[in-house]
Amino acid sequence: MDILVNVVLPLSLAIIMLSLGIGLTFADFGRVLRTPKAFATGAIAQVILLPGVTYCVVRAFGLPAEIAVGFMLLSFCPGGVTSNMLARLSRGDVALSVSLTAVISLLSILTVPVLAAWSVVHFMGDAAPDVSVTRLAVSVFVIVTLPVLIGVLIRRYATDFAISVEPFLSRLATLLFIIIVVAALAANWDIFVGNLDTLGPALVVLILVLLLVGLALARLAALPWDQSKTIAVETGIQNATLGITLAALISGQADGFSAMALPSGVYGILMYLVAAPFVVWFRSR
């Protein structure tokens, strides 16, 4: 388990983010300027509304401190490859989905460390582990931002290679994600069972509310239906692997995953189940 937490987990996340970056082109970032209203709406939903809604859900369900921190860590994470896939299945604006995921992932080096450090102190008080914002920022850069940038550069300067390796990396990223989620659940099985009556409903409510909030904000902004669907998906679907990794980095627990990782682990399964009816509805319109 020591090797899993300290080596396999961060390496797996780096590979997942590389698979995201290798599917990007510089044109994807240029779309931010061409569709500023849609991008700004999605960014506000992800960076501001998502953590705010999560905080309200955590308080409403009265979750234990470590699990509450785990919820907040998840809310600070950008979307991932999964949100892009679900946007495509929903017949949404895939280019907007990719742009949001890419830019928010790059900006996470600035937002995630500060917000994560705040949430740990806010919920855990005197029991909070020491969190170095600088160390966390460096870690986020190395395992999140840098792989995305490397992937983009590979796509730009070795396009044929990037196109040929992208399907393999996508399948590998999916496999690694499954392994990480299963390991996080197995390491915290007793805590999971003990908090199942609140953890499960809280996560289901969170995903439902976020999908609806993202959709409502997009409709209020009078965005086209395909962009509205995309913003709903990007708001409701987060990078669970990053949530688990952040929990491991913050807890400093070398012999296994901490309880902070549990919300992201369970979320990694529930997000598909809760999002499925929305995807079916979105495809029908």
Image (cartoon, rainbow, N blue to C red):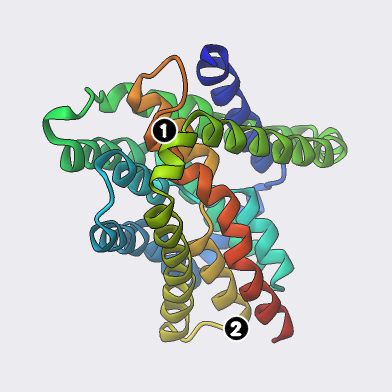
Label 1 packing within 10 angstroms: few (<14), some (14-19), many (20+): many
Relative side of 227 to 246, left or right: right
Residue 137: where, in percent of width, then height?
Answer: 36, 29
**Residue at (27%, 28%) from the top-left corner?**
133
Of mark 2 and mark 1, the one earlier in the sequence is 2
Q: Amino acid at mark 2?
A: Trp
Looking at the picture, tell me which residue is in the foreground, 90 or 5. 5
Relative side of 96 to 112, left or right: right
Residue 276: where, in percent of width, then height?
Answer: 66, 68
Q: The residue tagged with tag 2: helix, strand or loop?
A: helix
**Residue at (55%, 52%) from the top-left corner?**
101
Q: Amino acid at mark 1?
A: Leu
Using the image, determine if residue 119 lies above or below residue 203: above
Q: The residue tagged with tag 1: helix, strand or loop?
A: helix
Examine the image and state in which quarter residue 99 appears. bottom right
**Residue at (42%, 47%) from the top-left corner?**
74
Q: Distance between the Cα atoms at labels 2 and 1? A: 34 Å
Quarter of the figure that contains the N terminus? top right
Tell me the number on the disc at residue 225: 2
Examine the image and state in which quarter residue 282 appears. bottom right
Using the image, determine if residue 10 lies above or below residue 66: above
Tell me the number on the disc at residue 246: 1
**Residue at (60%, 67%) from the top-left corner?**
275
Residue 197: where, in percent of width, then height?
Answer: 41, 56
Question: Can the viewer see residue 29 in this picture?
Answer: no
Tell me the number on the disc at residue 49: none
Residue 256: where, in percent of width, then height?
Answer: 47, 21
Looking at the picture, tell me which residue is in the foreground, 72 or 204. 204
Using the image, determine if residue 231 lies above or below residue 251: below
Relative side of 246 to 158, left or right: left
